[in-house]
Image (cartoon, grey):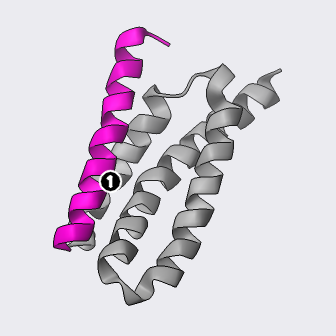
């Protein structure tokens, strides 16, 4: 993957995490949900190459499980629950894209 697109994908992830934290602090996940999903898609398309796919999927699946369970545990603290839900909205689309790319690569070989 070209270095420029990897840099953009990395920045997209950082921007997504910042938006997730801001959404948690100031509320309004529903109004930012589509933006987080689109940023997640960009991260999945641009940021992960073939050799990194397995590591990314392991980390992403762990993050999705922890944020999903954590948001249930943190439901008494609405700010943390919203931050975790927003991170989930960012990471899930990226995980789906990378998993599909990996499955395609495996099926092609």
- Residue to which mark 1 is pinned: 36
Residue at 33% from the left image edge and 49% from the top image edge? 17
SS assignment for the magenta stretch, majority: helix
Give above or below for 47 relative to 65. above
Residue at 36% from the left image edge and 73% from the top image edge? 80
Using the image as rendered, state which of residue 95 and residue 11 is in the foreground.
11
Q: Residues within 10 Å of mark 1 (few under 14, many from 20)?
A: many
- Left/right placement of residue 100 relative to residue 86 reads right
Which residue appears farthest toward the left when viewing the image? 26
Give above or below for 101 relative to 41. above
State the image coordinates of residue 1 (x, y, percent, origin top left): 50, 13
Give above or below for 38 relative to 31. above
Using the image as rendered, state which of residue 14 and residue 97 is in the foreground.
14
Q: Quadrant of residue 75?
A: bottom left
Residue at 27% from the left image edge and 68% from the top image edge? 24
Which corner quadrant holds the C terminus?
top right
Q: Is residue 53 magenta?
A: no
SS for tag 1?
helix
Using the image as rendered, state which of residue 22 and residue 44 is in the foreground.
22
- Left/right placement of residue 5 relative to residue 62 reads left
State the image coordinates of residue 66 (x, y, percent, origin top left): 58, 64
Q: Which residues are magenta?
A: 1-27
State the image coordinates of residue 84 (x, y, percent, origin top left): 42, 67
State the image coordinates of residue 68 (x, y, percent, origin top left): 54, 71
């Amino acid at each position: 993957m070209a270095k420029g697109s990897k840099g953009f994908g990395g920045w997209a992830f950082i921007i997504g995490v910042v938006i997730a934290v801001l959404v948690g602090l100031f509320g309004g996940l529903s109004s930012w949900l589509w933006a987080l999903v689109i940023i997640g898609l960009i991260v999945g398309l641009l940021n992960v190459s073939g050799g990194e796919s397995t590591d990314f999927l392991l980390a992403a699946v762990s993050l999705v499980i922890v944020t999903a369970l954590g948001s249930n545990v943190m439901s008494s603290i609405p700010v943390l629950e919203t931050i975790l839900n927003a991170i989930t909205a960012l990471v899930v689309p990226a995980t789906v894209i990378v998993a599909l790319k990996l499955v395609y690569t495996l099926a092609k070989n």
